[in-house]
Amino acid sequence: MVSLSPSETLIRDEAGLPPATRPAVLIWRRFRRHKGALIGGAVLVALALLAVLAPAIESWRGQDHEAVNLFNRFQPASAEHPLGTDDLGRDLLMRLIYGGRISLFVGLVTACLTASIGTVIGLVSGWYGGRVDAFLMRLCDGWITLPLLPLLIVLAAVDPTKVGLPAAIAKSPDLSLYRIVLIISLVAWTTSARLVRGVTLSLKTRDFVQAAVAQGASTARILFVHILPNALSPILVAATLASGNIILLESTLSFFGLGIQPPVASWGNILTNAQEIIWSQPMQAIYPGVLIFATVISLNFVGDGLQDAFDPRTEGR
Amino acid sequence: MTRFLSLRFLQALLVVLVMSFVVYSLIGLMPGDPIDIMLSGDPNMTAADAARLRAHYGLDRPLHERYLEWLGNAARGDFGFSRQHHQPVLAIVLPRLLNTLYLMIGAFVISVAIAIPAGVYAARHPRSWVDQAINLFCFAGISVPTFFLALLLIILFAVKLGILPAGGMKTIGQSSFTDQLRYLILPVMTLTIINIAQITRYLRSGMIEVLREDYIRTARAKGAHESRVVWRHALRNAMIPTVTIMALECGTLLSGAVITETMFAYLGMGKLILDSVLANDFNVALIGLLFACSVTLFLNLVADLLYAVLDPRISYR
């Protein structure tokens, strides 16, 4: 975030002006006006807290989220199991909390990875221009027109041992997690690449960048120290909106059995058998879906709120 | 125009060609090859038999050789045989493609028919309660996981109300058009709800921008009727960015079709792709994916042509 330089404060002092409001405060004031974003932010904080505290909640309630008890299948809601139990007699509430851990983790990590890939491609594309730019942007154009879900399905089905991964990693239970982060990042980088390219293009002829060039700064320094900080707010907005989409993709793939593999819980794979239980236990199919929906809509509202907050033109609208 | 068209056609062909190679290689990386499957079906086969079979079917040759052979056959219209359905691939894929197109066209037409009046109304009355309701609905539409929406609709219309079928294509023993239409309602409704949001949002912001333009004021000043100003002068220009989104949404629509078709056991392309990937039916999966890509590329080309119709400043000479 931009902070005011000492000289600017001094000038305002001498001119008898009140001290300028810090940009962060201005952004917060604008963000605060967006009701949806505030509520969404609160929902996200609550969900994140639950996810972080999951192991503590588990030991406090004494309910293991992976303990199978076949005599306890499809129990209705009770004091012991506030949301009942699933098809293997596991406590549904605990599975939902652990599922949230996975879904939020995938959303956060993949959004960061996606933003990084997009940023590097955008910087390179905007800075070098010419053929590099044309190639990367055509790639971008082509990429977003493709139907991504069918492609993700094929990518998710790839056998890790055949790409030369050592068996130790290929058999690890965490593999499905890493795989999903990786393949979603592969398809989702386009938005941030375009944004960063736009910022780079508009900044590269500006005086401060030209001054850095004249001083002999390396390209990497110019890109990451001089240009990138100016692109941070659009990247943050794009990453927030992207993380919602990522959570949707993860839950869809997990729902189809191609994402996070049981017994690890994710909101998507809790729903895998939902179509068989909607006739007998419709509520069990509704809880995980509502959680995904609440998370994604909160992220979208927060993203929208950030967009308005970073854009001074929305002031007074 | 002809030049532009042929250039774009060649570009699309190139994309499909590249995709075919990428998907061909990826499918080779999926677990198990046809011989493994034969082996698991016949306990009397020895390792030597398997090696002989691999040599016989050419599976021991390098990837690029096999790909070129596949490509040569494909160019002659021979896409191979489906392992799962015991039929030539085209005989399976074409009717499925048609079913998916019904679904997509239905959802597309209905969502545009709702999105245009909704977007225009919201833009003419920004910040009104109707605008805010539409906005909330749009946020919900982009945030709901498709499979969960389908599940909710099934719970509501098939389980609770019992007025619509939960899935399938037709009632056994019936072949009337209205019967098949009843099976289309829920899948089309699902796709419409997820598709409508983006179009409405882009149309709304496009309209708001256009309605501030000078030529709109001129049109009003010369006494043009308000409905003429909105529907003729403004809408036409506001549609230009919206058409891009509609074209891009076709990829999303196809991804949505994968989920919707699977949820409603609707025998379309999307379900075919997912099923054949899960069942190692490589030939079908490959053609299914390539057709899906071709359809979206074609629709994007149509959108480009629509540009020229909407905006005479753009010409493809």
Image: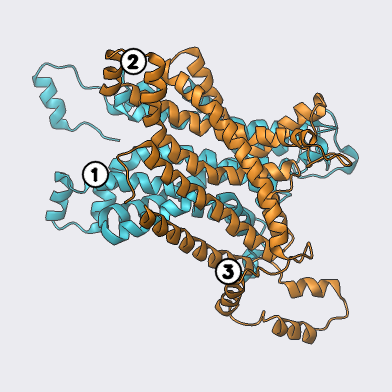
Say which residue appears at 79% left-offset and 42% top-offset: B168
> Which mark identifies residue B25?
3
Q: Chain of mark 2?
A: B
The Cα–Cα distance between marks 2 and 3, rounded to whole angstroms, is 60 Å
Say which residue appears at 46% left-offset and 13% top-offset: B128
The Cα–Cα distance between marks 1 and 2, rounded to whole angstroms, is 40 Å
From the image, tell me which residue sits under label 1: A202
The Cα–Cα distance between marks 3 and 1, rounded to whole angstroms, is 39 Å
Q: Nearer the viewer, residue B11 or B143?
A: B11
Q: Chain of mark 3?
A: B
Among the chains pictured, the one given orange colouring is B
Q: Earlier in the sequence, mark 2 or mark 3?
A: 3
- Residue B183 occupies quadrant: top right
Discs 1, 2 touching: Cβ within 8 Å: no
- Left or right, residue A91 beside residue A30: right
Residue B211 vertical placement versus A192 (above, below): above
Tell me if mark 2 has few (under 14), some (14-19) or many (20+) residues whose alpha carbon lies within 10 angstroms of its own: some
Q: Nearer the viewer, residue A209 or B123?
A: B123
Q: Nearer the viewer, residue A116 or A297?
A: A297
Does residue A188 appear in this view? Answer: no
The x, y position of residue B296, in whole percent, is 53, 50
> Which mark identifies residue B31?
none
From the image, tell me which residue sits under label 2: B224
The x, y position of residue A223, in whole percent, is 27, 52
Say which amino acid is labelled 3. Answer: Ser
Among the chains pictured, the one given cyan colouring is A
Residue B62 vertical placement versus A272 (above, below): below
The x, y position of residue B314, in whole percent, is 32, 43
Say which amino acid is labelled 2. Answer: Ala
Tell me if mark 3 has few (under 14), some (14-19) or many (20+) residues whose alpha carbon lies within 10 angstroms of its own: some
The x, y position of residue A85, in whole percent, is 81, 35
